[in-house]
């Protein structure tokens, strides 16, 4: 499993969610955020103050496919201007998960 972490300019999360859906990802969390530029650009990209962070725990094959979709095919508008990274996930636990079948 991998934690997919995508940071983009505000207003482009729907574009990313469309890509995730096409890759077979079934869920994500979107967090509004604010960027900080400091004295220099990060990775030669100007930093816009309003950001969105999309987080999803996905199978490794999804993380690789999404990275390829975002980086290689230019499927997001240039103005989305962000970055995508993935981290290994050792374990996933649910907090207060309700077993629907148990309640039926």
Image (cartoon, rainbow, N blue to C red):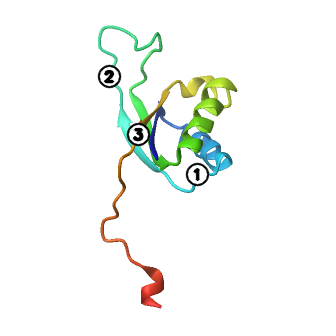
The residue to which callout 3 is attached is 88
Marks 3,2: beta carbons within 8 A: no
Indicate the quadrant where residue 80 lies.
top right
Q: What element carries label 3?
A: strand
**What residue sits 49% from the left and 51% below the top?**
28
Between label 3 and label 2, give the one nearer the viewer: 3
Which of the two labelled residues, at mark 2 and mark 1, occupies the earlier sequence position?
1
47 or 96: nearer the eye? 96
The residue to which callout 1 is attached is 25
Which of the two labelled residues, at mark 3 and mark 2, occupies the earlier sequence position?
2
Relative to 46, say whether 27 is above or below: below
Indicate the quadrant where residue 87 lies.
top left
x and y, in percent, of residue 91 in the image = 35, 52
- Residue 76 appears in the picture as rendered: no
Indicate the quadrant where residue 43 lies.
top left
- Residue 44 appears in the picture as rendered: yes
Relative to 93, say whether 86 is above or below: above
The residue to which callout 2 is attached is 36
The answer for how far apart the CA atoms under marks 3 and 2 are is 26 Å
The answer for how far apart the CA atoms under marks 1 and 3 are is 17 Å
x and y, in percent, of residue 2 in the image = 45, 43
The answer for how far apart the CA atoms under marks 2 and 1 are is 30 Å
**What residue sits 35% from the left and 27% below the top?**
35
Query: Mark 3, residues whose alpha carbon is within 10 Å: few (<14), some, or many (≥20)?
Result: few
């Amino acid at each position: 499993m991998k934690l997919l972490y995508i940071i983009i300019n505000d207003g482009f999360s729907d574009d990313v969610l469309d890509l995730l859906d096409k890759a077979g990802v079934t869920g994500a969390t979107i967090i509004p955020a604010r960027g900080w530029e400091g004295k220099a650009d990060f990775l030669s990209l100007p930093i816009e103050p309003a950001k969105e962070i999309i987080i999803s725990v996905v199978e490794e094959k999804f993380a690789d496919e999404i990275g390829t979709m975002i980086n290689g095919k230019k499927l997001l508008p240039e103005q989305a201007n962000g970055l995508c990274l993935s981290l290994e996930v050792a374990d996933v636990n649910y907090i207060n998960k309700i077993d629907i079948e148990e309640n039926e």
